[in-house]
Amino acid sequence: MHRLTLILLCLGMGCAPLRAADALAAVQLADAARVKATIAGDVQRLGELLTDDLLYGQNDGRVQTKTEFLNAVTSNQVKYEALEYQDTKLVETAPHVVTMTGLVHLKVSRGQTRVEFGVRFLAVWREDDGKWRLHAYQSARLPEPSTASAGKATP
């Protein structure tokens, strides 16, 4: 009897890393779909990938609800052309919750002006009814690279 209990316990503990790996892979797929929908301006698909109580913190300090964020994408005031991730990390922080952190390089158009910049971000994904959705997002714009020569000392 004790042997059966031990085997079942070991199997259960061994499954936890597999569930976490599945969650991380599912979030990566959901995020790739979110990026694709954002670039395409597909607010229908994008809306399906966001929780209803989304809080989306822009790098300029504004915090938008799901409706406000989708309206901004619909308005095309800012058109996302490319999002290129670097240095990303995904962690299952609680059951049905995954955090994603990293650096993303953005290429966006505002009217006739094209802007490129990098941001550090924190995204919180939540599994609801078997689907992973973005629940919260916050980014901070990185400073522009210095144009000063490497040999000059700064005070």
Image: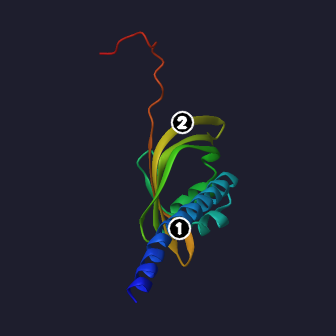
Indicate the amino acid at tag 2.
Phe
Residue farthest along the top direction in this orientation? 151
Q: Secondary structure at mark 1?
A: helix
Residue 25 in the figure: left or right of residue 100: right
Task: Give coordinates of residue 138: x percent, y percent.
Answer: 44, 52
Question: Looking at the picture, how far across and down is residue 59, in whole percent?
Answer: 45, 45
Residue toward you, 34 or 91: 91
* Pick the front one: 120 or 56: 120
Which residue corresponds to mark 1? 18
Question: Which residue appears farthest toward the bottom when viewing the image?
Answer: 1
Q: Which amino acid is tagged 1?
A: Leu
| Mark 2 neighbour class, 10 Å CA radius: few under 14, some 14 to 19, many 20 or more | some
- Which residue bears the numbered disc 2? 117
Q: Name above or below for residue 94 compared with residue 101.
A: below
Left or right: 29 as drawn, with respect to 19: right
Residue for point 47% across, 29% down: 144
Residue at figure coordinates x 53%, y 63% from the top left: 21
Q: Quadrant of residue 155?
A: top left
Q: Position of residue 31 (x, y in %)?
A: 59, 58
First in sequence: mark 1 vs mark 2: 1
Q: Which residue is at a point 62% across and 63% down the rendered structure image?
A: 46
Q: Secondary structure at mark 2?
A: strand
Identify the mark at residue 95; answer none if there is no mark.
Answer: none
**Relative vertical location of residue 95 with respect to residue 93 in this rendering, above or below:** below
| Vertical side of 132 occupied by 89: above or below | above
Tell me if I can see residue 67 in this picture.
no
Image check: 49 left or right of 13? right
Q: CA distance from mark 1 to mark 2?
A: 36 Å
Visible in this render: residue 148? yes
Mark nearest the camera among 1 and 2 is: 1
Residue 105, how many percent across, how many down?
56, 40
